[in-house]
Image: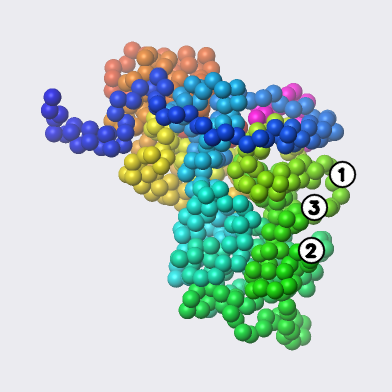
Amino acid sequence: MRLPAVIAPLAVVAAVLGVTGYAVQAPVSNRPLPSSEPSQLTETVQRLNALLVENWSAHGLAPAEPADDLTILRRLTLAIVGTVPSLEEIRRFEKDTRPDRLAHWTAGLLEDVRFHDYFAERLARAYVGVEGGQFIVFRRDRFTDWLSEQLRKHRPYDGIVRDLIATDGVWTDKPAVNFISAAYSNDAFDENKLAGRTVRAFLGQRIDCAQCHDHPFAHWKQAEFEGLAACFGKTRMSIVGVDDGRKEPFEVEDRKTLVKRQVEPAVPFGAEWMPSTGDPRERLAAWVTNPDNRRLDRAIANRVWGLIFGKPFLTERPVDDLPDPDEADADGQNQILDVLADDFRAHNRDLRRLVQVIAASQAFRADSRAASSGSGSSGSCRWETFPLVRLRPEQVVGSMLQASTIRTIDRNSHLLTRALRFSRERDFVEDFGDPGENELGERVGTVPQALLRMNGNLQNDLVQPNPFNATTRIANDAEDPAGCVEVAYLVCLTRRPTPEEAEHFAKEIAGRPKKEREQAVADLMWTLFNSTEFSWNH
């Protein structure tokens, strides 16, 4: 039968986007279940859990009950790929009857290109910030693409760090160079900026204030910071890009006497880890990544914990301001962090394994509700419950975009679908407000953000019925009003409605003609998008 002229183009677009003939009740895909075998994590996870339980007991805290599997699936996808799971993924997950399905799904998500791209962006914020910089000498897009590729190749973390610190060349041909070229301005490199960022990003220590004076609280001395800055003192911009061919010695000026003095490359601790030969940045990279430099492993363990939970493990300190590894640990927190760091180092500094260990822990799989009204940590998070954390802007818009369609938006999606997602996500984050490099700090919702979610064009476009979105599919393909409500809750909140919720919304949908039924489902989707539950991780 020939389609009417107006409908035919829509049918073509629907076929391109892959939304035709898509039932919302049956399992929606015959793709194989994630089959990546989880690493042998049992011993490490048991040690981690034992220390957590010991710490809770010492502070009189009762651990929360385990969360249900759908709640944990939502946490996993938000943490690893930045969105809620699609209905397609939920159906496949519920079809998976393996007793350790959560471990298998974690491993499967870590092989997904969405993880490579999402974590590359999150890590890039610590390494080069969020600004575009000088386009002539800095290409942030090339940098994040390169990071994503390293994750896809299962590159050990220390290898990535060595490349970032020591690579020479042109920032387009050797994207790792952008870590260095990001600090180039006014025809010169800012050695102090590079030294401070290197230690903060890779070692989790704030040594920046020692640039001008001895640290008033920590043991860092100004001379130690100057030695680190001198490691970048030979770096120059040449016709072949970045290299360490600068001939002039690195000098610093005394702020009081204005007398300049020459400073040689040096490190503030573990001098024996630093090779005596080679270019200064190569020597520094070897020192940072030395197997005995525990700070590297503790710093990334704390940061990845933060990316997964929304706040770093040591919640009372900034993510890049850890205590020294050998600092007195009367509270037991250092010991717990060391379990993660030691396992990471013992397994070839594999970022995937680090994520898997954290995701398998009792802390990650705990409910967000305290075990009893009297159980609490007086504002100090000790992970006896999964903390309530606001979603980051890209998670909010990514979840709205994913919830507006039945299928998973991933590398298998059509190019048009992915392009639309990219442009919409970029515009929404710009309007919503990007937290920048401080994305693991406390996030407070604002009135403009709430108004954007309620009245923004994007949200209205996503929920209003059209031939291609989830609203229409749910309204027309669900078996009955109760089915409409159930699927809407699954795609938006990754849970089924309570009996009271199901009864209330089913009454609003029941008995309506087709167009009104679609609009009622659109109203339900809009309501769920704007619920507090949608915009928080829990």
Label 1 element class: loop
- Residue 158 is marked as none
Amino acid type at circle 2 is Gly
Quadrant where the N terminus sits is top left
Q: Kindly identify the residue that appears in the image at 39 percent across and 15 percent down.
A: 481
Residue 466, above or below 476: below
Q: Nearer the viewer, mark 3 or mark 1?
A: 3
Residue 498, above or below 34: above
Q: Nearer the viewer, mark 3 or mark 2?
A: 2
Label 2 element class: loop
Q: Residue 387 in the image: x percent, y percent?
A: 66, 35
Question: Residue at label 1?
Answer: 330
- Residue 325 is marked as 3
**Magenta part of the chain:** 364-378
Upstream in sequence: badge 3 or badge 2: 2
Dividing the picture into quarters, in which one does residue 418 lie?
A: top left
Q: Residue 371: within the magenta?
A: yes
Q: Residue 121: within the magenta?
A: no
Upstream in sequence: badge 2 or badge 1: 2
